[in-house]
Image: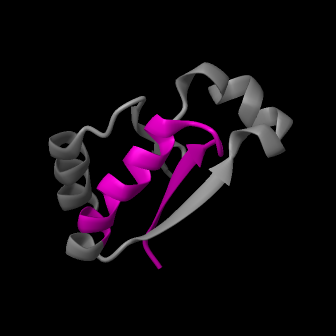
Amino acid sequence: MRQLTLVSRDYCHLCHEMEVALAPLASEFGFALRVLDVDADSALEVKYDELVPVLLHEETELCHHFLDVAGVRDYLRKIL
């Protein structure tokens, strides 16, 4: 299954906005979105604390803070 990961936190409005904004792309490209709580994993917190939300495909960072729709769409076209 194709999957992207959103590193997020519960009280982050930018995180919630990115998750909502990803829904149309998920429908268009057929990927699942896994949401990870940065505060629940110390390794994630060390790596991404101030960058959340962070969108990843495997180990590739696609964007952080705000969804780069055009960049993510281009990336997905290349890998799919």
Determine which quarter of the picture holds residue 43: top right
Residue 22 is a magenta residue: yes
**Residue 64 placement, left or right of 10:** left
Name the residue rendered at 39%, 46% in the picture. Answer: 17
Residue 20 is a magenta residue: yes
Residue 80 visible in the snapshot:
no
**Residue 7, horizontal then vertical, whole percent:** 58, 44
**Residue 9, horizontal then vertical, whole percent:** 64, 42
Name the residue rendered at 59%, 43% in the picture. Answer: 8
Q: Which of 13 and 7 is in front in this view?
A: 13
Residue sitting farthest toward the top: 50
Q: Which contiguous range is marked in magenta?
A: 1-26
Name the residue rendered at 63%, 28% in the picture. Answer: 48
Residue 67 visible in the snapshot:
yes
Q: Is residue 31 above or below residue 38?
A: below
Q: Is residue 24 above or below residue 10?
A: below
Name the residue rendered at 19%, 53% in the picture. Answer: 73
Q: Which of 22 and 80 is in front in this view?
A: 22
Count of marks overlaid on the render: 0
**Residue 6, horizontal then vertical, whole percent:** 52, 50
